[in-house]
């Protein structure tokens, strides 16, 4: 259904036996629609696919071959504003054999959702297999390190804890594009219709309520403790304490870890252990060993990449 017009201003914004490491193989494929293709510089890596463990029964596991996509969601103004970063990301994807997309709006999602942050999650369901979803202000901070390690986790969705606060980050995540994942993303997008009148950090606040209702201990009851805190957020951005009280409430139910609920598996990585770090925090693993990742940096300090 189409959302009602908003009356308030736009806001700022375990399955341990099946854990595996997997392998990556070369598999050239055609360039999909909406993909930014880098010029052939002689350093092209054939398109990769990942062998992903999808189910286990006793000692027998099923494996599925999936292509790896990197997607940045940005409208025309943000594509212009963050053009240098998007160019670096395109080069990073191209050199590692990943499919690179910059998406504006899917026509269906544009009709359904007014808020671009919620519209993003709807649009993502239209593309790819194993997808790294990225904000447009992300830049490769250690560009010599690829994302293959993160592509082989068996969970359907991968999130991570922000470095500098208690939130689960909403702008960057990884999905395995399945029916259960698409349902989760569309339900997340539908929280656009439930946003309170005060500051709730748009989709970033909503993901906390959505997670505790999906894999946590809180029922889908508007009177439940964390939901009540969310719906009673009436303070502006100048008073963030009610918002942080809501976040703290949810994180008691959904700490970092792996979750399995009715066929949907989700992993939340603890601070500084994921493929992405907020700002230019890269203080761990300075020798370049380990799985590596990206730095989530502001466009104004992109020179640090």
Image (cartoon, rainbow, N blue to C red):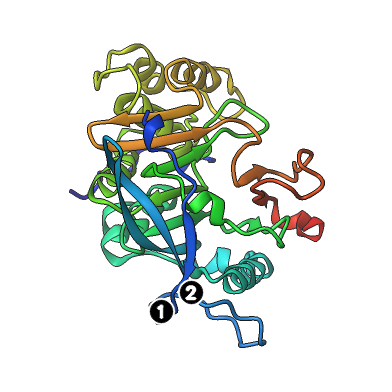
Confirm whether residue 71 shows in the render.
no
Horizontal side of residue 80 vs 133, given as left or right: right
Residue in the picture at 52% in, 78% down: 46
Point out residue 2 in the picture as x, y percentages from the top left corner: 21, 50
Q: Residue 236 lies in what quarter of the image?
A: top right
Element assignment for label 1 = loop
Q: Which residue is mark 2?
A: 47
Residue in the picture at 52% in, 22% down: 243
Please state the total of marks drawn on the protein image.
2
Point out residue 140 in the picture as x, y percentages from the top left corner: 68, 59
Residue in the picture at 66% in, 35% down: 272
Point out residue 215 in the picture as x, y percentages from the top left corner: 33, 27
Residue 294 lies, with reference to residue 34, above or below; the image says: above
Q: Residue 143 lies in what quarter of the image?
A: bottom right
Quote the CA–CA distance across marks 1 and 2.
Answer: 6 Å
Confirm whether residue 136 shows in the render.
yes
Instruction: Mark 1 and mark 2 in contact? Answer it, CB < 8 Å.
Output: yes
Residue 294 lies, with reference to residue 282, above or below; the image says: below
Q: Residues within 10 Å of mark 2 (few under 14, many from 20)?
A: many
Q: Residues within 10 Å of mark 1 (few under 14, many from 20)?
A: few
Residue furthest front as drawn: 59
Q: Earlier in the sequence, mark 1 or mark 2?
A: 1
Point out residue 301 in the picture as x, y percentages from the top left corner: 78, 54
Horizontal side of residue 284 vs 239, given as left or right: right
Q: Residue 33 lies in what quarter of the image?
A: bottom left
Q: Which mark is residue 29?
A: 1
Horizontal side of residue 296 vs 177, given as left or right: right
Give the position of the C terminus as an image quadrant: bottom right
52 or 69: which is nearer to us?
Answer: 52
Residue in the picture at 26% in, 54% down: 112
57 or 27: which is nearer to us?
Answer: 57
Element assignment for label 2 = loop
């Amino acid at each position: 259904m189409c959302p009602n017009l908003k009356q308030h201003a736009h806001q700022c914004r375990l399955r341990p036996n099946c854990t595996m490491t997997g392998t990556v193989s070369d598999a050239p494929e055609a360039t999909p629609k909406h993909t930014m293709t880098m010029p052939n510089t002689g350093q092209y890596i054939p398109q990769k696919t990942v062998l992903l463990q999808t189910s286990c029964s006793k000692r027998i596991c099923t494996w599925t071959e999936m292509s790896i996509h990197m997607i940045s969601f940005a409208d025309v103004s943000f594509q212009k504003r963050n053009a240098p970063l998007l160019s670096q990301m395109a080069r990073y994807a191209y050199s590692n054999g990943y499919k690179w997309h910059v998406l504006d709006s899917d026509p269906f999602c544009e009709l359904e959702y007014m808020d671009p942050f919620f519209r993003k999650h709807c649009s993502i369901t239209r593309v790819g297999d194993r997808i790294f979803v990225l904000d447009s202000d992300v830049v490769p901070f250690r560009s010599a390190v690829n994302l293959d390690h993160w592509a082989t986790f068996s969970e359907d969705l991968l999130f991570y804890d922000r470095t500098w606060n208690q939130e689960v980050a909403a702008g960057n995540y990884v999905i395995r594009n399945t029916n259960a994942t698409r349902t989760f993303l569309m339900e997340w997008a539908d929280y656009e219709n439930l946003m309170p009148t005060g500051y709730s950090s748009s989709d970033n606040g909503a993901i906390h309520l959505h997670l505790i209702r999906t894999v946590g201990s809180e029922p889908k009851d508007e009177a439940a403790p964390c939901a009540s805190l969310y719906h009673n957020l009436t303070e502006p951005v100048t008073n963030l304490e009610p918002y942080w009280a809501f976040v703290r409430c949810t994180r008691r139910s959904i700490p970092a870890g792996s979750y399995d609920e009715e066929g949907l598996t989700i992993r939340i990585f603890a601070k500084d252990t994921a493929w992405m770090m907020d700002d230019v925090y890269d203080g761990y693993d300075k020798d370049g060993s380990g799985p590596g990742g990206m730095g989530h940096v502001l466009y104004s300090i992109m020179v640090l990449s």
